[in-house]
Image (cartoon, grey):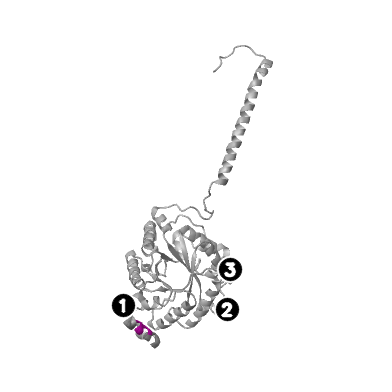
């Protein structure tokens, strides 16, 4: 209750004596407030310690964005990785530096994969033409010990890996194909310390005269370690009659004998792709186009052959740009027009075919973030450059 104002004249002494109870009350109030503050602080500390924390690292922001982007994130997909830069770094091919985690480049790749939901990599690891002499022939990789460490990081982050190779720069040059045995043995030796899902060959012959050695090369590798291969649309179109006379007599005999002994016409090798996919442990279709309906058609034609033999496969879509690949083979320009439409398409393809492969890391990152991975700026919600 509020007391009425007093008009009594007070001396300094009487004023001082009347203030004593007020000071005691203030002291009590201060003590109470302090105690409450300490209790609240203690409660906050306990909650911070006991409540579960989000597993988001400083360089792995949460993935906000459109519903299409969220569908893309959850879709099962793989990433083709040639390199993180377009040329050389300090006189070495850029992919050499990626394989040794130079400037944290491989760590950045893992961060990118985790943010975008990639569960597998097709990681380039060399060619017979450039890395066989003194390297694969000695069962080693480029920057061997560092490279093995990077593969172990993938394993620790639950990211599968197929190591990708090719024979020679000229896709129709099959000379030295027998040397893939050394690649297979290198991978076999490495697999004793780290999990490697498969060897993947990307030797895109278009000359029928190269097909015989292509099949022999893939079989040599697959006999030592599980081996997969890219598939060109041309191979899906070419019939047995188109190509069989370009093969060696022994391979012709094998093909004809198989078809003669196969009572089920659906199990006969009608197209060149049938012979190829039955020579390896898996395959991946180059469904390259800037038209989504064409990508689906290419993929469907391939999966008709794969499913007919009870095999496994994946479609690959191209996202590069510039002089190579040509505009009609890449989705890059569709992404630039409408990135949400692109993300929705990737999610749709992944759902239809159980997985989808995006080709490839450097240019895809550049499309998403306007810089090459070698100029790493971190990952976040993609933009349109």
Residue under pointer 1: 264
Q: Position of residue 224 (x, y in %)?
A: 49, 77
Q: Position of residue 356 (x, y in %)?
A: 40, 65
Q: Nearer the viewer, mark 1 or mark 3?
A: 1
- Mark 3 or mark 2: name the one nearer the start of the chain: 2
Image point (60%, 40%), residue name: 42
> Mark 1 touching mark 2, by CB under 8 A?
no
Q: What secondary structure is the magenta-colored segment mainly?
A: helix
Residue under pointer 3: 146
Q: Secondary structure at mark 3?
A: helix
Q: Position of residue 309 (x, y in %)?
A: 36, 73
Left or right position of 85 against 250: right
Quadrant placement of the C terminus: bottom left
Left or right position of 10 against 170: right
Packing grade of label 3 (10 A; few <14, some 14-19, many >=20) is: some
Q: CA distance from mark 1 to mark 3?
A: 50 Å
**Which span is picked out in magenta?**
254-258
Q: CA distance from mark 3 to mark 2?
A: 16 Å
**Res. 156 image quadrant:** bottom right
Image point (48%, 61%), residue name: 113
Can residue 168 be seen here? no
Marker disc for residue 138: 2
- Mark 1 or mark 3: name the one nearer the start of the chain: 3
Left or right position of 339 against 184: left
194 is higher (above) or lower (below) than 54: below
Quadrant placement of the N terminus: top right
Q: Secondary structure at mark 2?
A: helix
């Amino acid at each position: 209750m509020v007391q009425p104002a007093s008009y009594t004249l007070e001396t300094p002494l009487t004023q001082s004596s009347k203030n004593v109870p007020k000071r005691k009350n203030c002291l009590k109030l201060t003590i109470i407030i302090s105690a409450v503050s300490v209790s609240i602080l203690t409660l906050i500390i306990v909650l911070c310690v006991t409540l579960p924390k989000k597993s988001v690292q400083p360089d792995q922001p949460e993935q906000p964005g459109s519903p299409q982007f969220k569908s893309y994130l959850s879709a099962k997909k793989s990433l083709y990785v040639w390199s993180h830069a377009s040329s050389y770094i300090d006189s070495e091919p850029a992919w050499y530096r990626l394989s040794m985690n130079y400037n944290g480049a491989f760590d950045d790749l893992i961060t990118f994969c985790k943010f975008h939901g990639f569960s597998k990599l097709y990681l380039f690891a060399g060619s017979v033409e450039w890395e066989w002499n003194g390297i694969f022939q000695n069962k080693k990789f480029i920057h061997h010990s560092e490279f093995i460490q990077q593969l172990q990081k993938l394993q620790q982050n639950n990211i599968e890996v197929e190591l990708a190779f090719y024979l020679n720069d000229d896709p129709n040059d099959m000379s030295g194909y027998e040397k893939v045995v050394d690649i297979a043995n290198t991978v076999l030796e490495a697999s004793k310390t780290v999990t490697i899902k498969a060897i993947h060959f990307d030797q895109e012959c278009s000359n029928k005269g190269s097909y015989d050695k292509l099949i022999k090369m893939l079989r040599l590798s697959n006999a030592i370690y599980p081996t997969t291969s890219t598939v060109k649309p041309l191979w899906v179109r070419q019939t047995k009659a188109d190509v069989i006379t370009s093969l060696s007599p022994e391979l012709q005999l094998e093909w004809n004998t198989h078809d003669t002994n196969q009572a089920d016409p659906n199990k006969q090798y009608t197209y060149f792709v049938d012979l190829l996919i039955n020579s390896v442990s898996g395959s991946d279709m180059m469904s390259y186009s800037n038209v989504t309906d064409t990508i689906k058609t290419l993929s469907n034609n391939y999966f008709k052959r794969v499913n007919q033999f009870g095999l496994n496969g994946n479609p690959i879509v191209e996202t590069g740009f510039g002089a190579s690949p040509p505009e009609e083979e890449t989705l890059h320009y569709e992404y630039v027009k409408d990135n949400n439409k692109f993300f929705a398409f990737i999610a749709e393809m992944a759902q239809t075919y159980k997985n989808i492969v995006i080709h490839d890391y450097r240019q895809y990152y550049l499309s998403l973030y306007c810089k090459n991975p070698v100029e790493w700026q971190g990952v976040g919600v993609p933009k349109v450059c």
